[in-house]
Image (cartoon, helix red, strand yellow):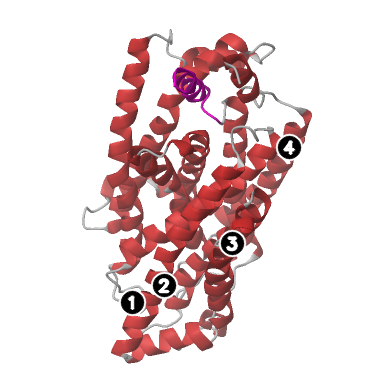
Amino acid sequence: MSEEKIERDLLSNINWSNKFKIWFGFLTALLVVCLWFYVLQLRKGLGVTGMNDIVSWGIYISNFVFFIAAALIGMLISSVLGMIGYTWIKPISRIAEIIAVAFAMVAGIVIITDMGRPDRLHHVLLYGRIQSPIIWDISVVMTYLMLSLLLLYIPLIPDISLCKEKLTGLPKFQKKLYKVLSLGWAGNEAQYKTIKRYFKILLILIIPVALAIHTVTSWLFAMTLRTGWDSPIFGPYFVSGAFVAGCAAVLIAMYFIQKNYKLQAYITDMHFDRMAKLLVLVSLVYVYFNINEILVPAYKFKPSEVKHIGNLLYGHDSLLFWLVQGGGLIVPFMLLMIPKMRKPLPAMLISVVILVAAWFKRYVIVVPTQLEPYLPIQNVPESFHSYMPTLPEIAITVGTLVMVLMIISVLTKLFPVVPVWEMKEELLEEQHQ
């Protein structure tokens, strides 16, 4: 393999093919339909959703927690594994960072969908109280998004300059974009040292911020006295769950990027095998917290806790609970213990199941708990005794998922998804050995 072949292979995805235009057109049409439902919600209020006085947090907040969870994968792959010294993550680190940026960007939009008066969003910043965990959450989300953008952008600078020099027939906006973002890159040794130094600083900074973002999100629940949320383990519980969702998202992205852009020489079966093993590891940690979530309150046998746990284990929400725990966590990680299941296609399919279950797990955390208040639900309409998302609610939630796919799709068409200069560097190291 030569440097010319590396450049040719890894820059091949940067083109606006007809296949991509059809895909993006489909996403755009779907988003327009979803936005129509959001306009309907703006006009008529949150009454068009299934939320009510009892269940005031529905699938919007479940979606927010899920997006924040998936966004943590950039920190796990690039920062933690990178600083430990695992070189096998190099070809997939940018994929993880793109996923982190996409989910973190849309997480803020998800919060707006849950607001009855989004025109007053700025009041949160102007009149928010430092005692409120919501202010902490917003501050950490914004900080994490900025660090994630920098973590994606700084190692991209040499490749952006390469795109500017090597690629021809690009639209004018794309040429101008590369010129601005390359920052006059010349490719000398001093510039590479500068990039590596600042990149290491970011890798260190993003670890506490990433842990804080999901810990603070968990505090939105844990700092209440509500049964099912009043738990001191919610911080690490949410973080471990985030790693499961993030690893599954990366495995899915790896599969489609490898197939669509013909990158089998760079994203190999070895990468799928090791990512699947990582998914098994974080799943085991998450299983521990899931057991702890049920076992400890069940042992104490408080009446309110018993009622809530009974509802999850054998009551109204038991089917969803067991599908999420068994079908979406235990069975998949047991399958991934089998070497053949860690091949690209089976690993991707298992990851899809895990990611879908991860979303419904957030639903199980958010909704059933609200249906078990300390006082009996009375003197309210019968519909308040349960929660069922409406069509506008589902469409708006789908719209946020579509936005994530659009951001990922555009980023993978604008920039190399595998770091070109790092692959060249690795080639030179092999030649010198």
Distance Cα–Cα, label 2 vs label 1: 18 Å
| Residue marked by disc 4 | 25
Which residue sits at x=47%, y=39%?
Answer: 89
Quadrant into which the N terminus falls: top right
Q: Position of residue 24 (x, y in %)?
A: 70, 37
Using the numbered discs, state the Cα–Cα distance from disc 3 to disc 1 in whole angstroms: 41 Å
Q: Is residue 118 above or below residue 382?
A: above
**Which callout, 2 or 1, points at the residue further toward the start of the chain?**
1
Q: Nearer the viewer, residue 54 or 342?
A: 342
Q: Residue 322 — which label?
A: none
The mark that comes first in sequence, 3 or 4, is 4
Distance between mark 3 and mark 4 Cα atoms: 39 Å
Find the distance from the CA under tag 4 to the CA under tag 2.
41 Å
Determine the CA span between mark 2 and mark 3: 23 Å
Name the main secondary structure of what is drawn in magenta.
Answer: helix
In front: mark 2 or mark 3? 3
In the rendered structure, which amino acid carries the disc numbered 1?
A: Arg
Q: Residue at x 41, y 72 (%)?
A: 290
Extreme residue toward the left, this view: 131
Residue at label 2? Answer: 290
* Residue labelled with disc 1: 226
Q: Residue furthest front?
A: 433
How far, Cα to Cα, is label 4 from label 1? 44 Å
Residue at which label 3 appears: 338
Q: Which residues are magenta?
A: 418-433
User: Under tag 3, what secondary structure?
Assistant: loop
Q: Secondary structure at mark 4?
A: helix
Depth check, front residue: 325 or 272: 272
